[in-house]
Image (spheres, grey):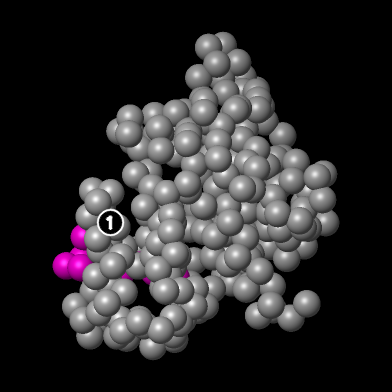
Amino acid sequence: MSPSTLLSRIEDAGLNASAPPQQRWIDGWLVRFSAGKAKRARCVNAVAEGRLPLADKLALAQAVFDDAGLPMVLRITPFTQPASLDARLDAAGFQPIDDTRVMVSPDLGSLRALPLPDGLCWAPVDSAAFAHAVGALRGSPAGQREAHAERLRLSPVPYRAWAIRREDDGAVVACGQYAREAELVGLYDVFTDPAYRARGLAAILCSRLLAAARAQGARTAYLQVDADNGPARRVYHRLGFTDGYAYHYRVRGGSG
């Protein structure tokens, strides 16, 4: 498989894994309008060029977001159609935000699950409990936690979530999940309690998630991370990930 074909498949897998029930098609645009935190589930993905003028499509999409009470967000990737859309949105006053990297580990064969420190344990978490646990760690409002739980419950690609807990009281100190589609696995919602950062827990968590996915048949892993999140990117580099491609969002007036 060529590198470009692999990245295209990863983009498809990421779209499948982030699919909310609140979505519709508008002339080649996959319009998602979940009330959750993740922009992947509340944005426009320009998958096909379509036939309508850009102004008409923007108006139709804006009406969907207005009805949902959400700002309109458009996601721009190397696979966006047409390729000129980013420049046209820029000329129309849409501002870029959230420079993001899709990182890829093409071969999980040599990966080893890292051991846990004393006093911590490894436990599976169901989707509803996970959405609320990671939401609590992030400080997300209740509505976003509920939307996240709904998206996970109805996802066309099943998720598996795990947490690192304190043995004495069961408190979650780090958590994450993966979504596997054929031989591809994506890491999602990897988060460590700020009080437990710089202890190697993110690397332990990710190594164990990937080992579990590999046991189910995964061979290639991907994830999405903010371009300026240096600490996380260093962890992922150590686990064998490198940058595959970049994407960003565009919004009116720079708010998303």
How far from the left and from the top, in percent, is residue 34?
A: 38, 47
Residue 37 lies, with reference to residue 46, above or below; the image says: above
In the image, residue 173 lies in the stretch drawn in magenta: no
Q: Is residue 7 visible?
A: yes
How far from the left and from the top, in percent, is residue 182?
A: 76, 56
Under tag 1, what secondary structure? Answer: helix
Q: Residue at x 54, y 73 (%)?
A: 245
Q: Quadrant of residue 242?
A: bottom right
Q: Quadrant of residue 137?
A: top left
How far from the left and from the top, in percent, is residue 181?
A: 70, 54
Query: Which part of the image, by quadrant, shows the N terminus?
Result: bottom right
Q: Main secondary structure of the magenta part?
A: strand
Residue that label 1 marks:
65
Residue 204 lies, with reference to residue 224, above or below; the image says: above
Q: Is residue 226 visible?
A: no
Q: Amino acid at mark 1?
A: Phe
Q: Residue at x 49, y 66 (%)?
A: 101
Residue density around tag 1, few if under 14, some if 14–19, many if 20 or more, within 10 Å: many
How far from the left and from the top, in percent, is residue 29?
A: 43, 70
Residue 29 lies, with reference to residue 78, above or below; the image says: above
Q: Which range of residues does the magenta coloring cover?
A: 247-255
- The reply, left or right, for residue 230 in relation to residue 96 is right
- The reply, left or right, for residue 177 in relation to residue 196 is right
